[in-house]
Amino acid sequence: MIKTAKKLFEKIEEYRTICIFGHVRPDGDAYGSAMGLKLALDFLFPDKTIYAVVDPLDLVPAGLPLAKRPGTIPEDVIRKSLCITVDTATIDRICDRRALDGEFVIKIDHHPLVEHFGDLEFVDPEKISCSLIIAAMLFSIHPMISPAAAECLLLGLVTDSGGFRFTADPEAYAMAARLIANGADIQQIYDKLNTVSLDSLKLKGKLLSQIKTAGCLAYEVFTKEDLAKMGYTADQIAPRVNTIGNTAECPVWAFFAQYPNGKYRAELRCARNYQVDGVALALGGGGHKQASGAELADEAAVRKAIQMLGALQPSEA
């Protein structure tokens, strides 16, 4: 890790302006790794100008800064900058495609490697979150980071590990302890993640009342008409897929939510002795063994996904 981190910091030291990009439809790890790296570098290199570029995210605790919206950094700034993409496996997933216009481009990711891009890549699919990779690289060179940076990185680690339910990696737990020691407020993170509004609670009840099953799969399909009646968008509903998860009878679960253009956002999840990433790849998407996603063209693709997921068998691993 020290050798890898040195390569990263050699490039960071070369540039006065650095732009860090997450992925479209961000989660806690996209925000946490981008903003965590930005804040850590702000602390370590106060003379540099550093941007984190990620769409707004509701689960960010109060007090943590907002990232720049994609498309808001001027093109001339990007072209002379070091651009770093985080938590993003493919070009199509970069929140602002202009990231590839940077003078030098670095990719840091933890998804299975399906597409090479950039001038330098740091990819480790064995790590539970990109935030874990970034934190390890930072601490291998610098003994301390700022509390805000530590909290962002911990948010990414907590969310991508499912509150540490999806990993038994000692490094993940040790890193959480180190981030807390550097000032991260884990109670604030859990409060933000676990506090819901009454409206959200009512929505949860509605979702639980309309579960369908097929083989080992529990699922729900939301047409654009359904979503209009509910007052929600596909991107608001699809991430709530874990509402119907972790039942004894259905170790695989999924939400399919339709966009106004007719396509569906598919969010796929499963228990740890199953794997949904293969199905996601077959559908043109990707992700992790227990958490993947895809964009499906139409209802026929949704039916195909349901058939494939319902027929899954436990993995040997």
Image (spheres, grey):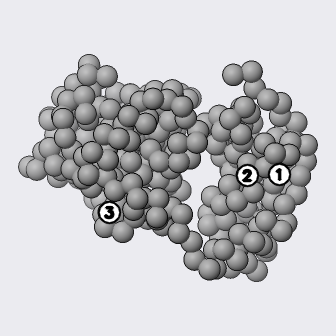
In the image, is 22 to the left or to the right of 40? right
Which residue carries the number 3 mark?
Answer: 64
Q: Is residue 254 left or right of residue 184?
A: right
Residue placed most toward the observer, 201 or 283:
201
In the rendered view of the protein, which quadrant contains the C terminus? top right
Q: Which residue lies at the image location 86% right of the left edge and 46% below the top edge?
A: 249
> Can the viewer see residue 69?
no
Instruction: Give residue 5's position: percent from left, percent from top.
Output: 26, 27
**SS at badge 3:** loop
Task: Give the residue at mark 1.
Answer: 218
Residue 207 position within the rendered picture, expressed as x and y whole percent measured from the top left: 77, 67
| Percent x, y of residue 108 | 39, 35
Label 2 or label 3, whichever lies nearer to me, is 2
Name which residue lies at 20% across and 29% down. 141
Q: In the image, is residue 282 above or below residue 198?
A: above
Which residue occupies the foreground of this view, 37 or 317?
317
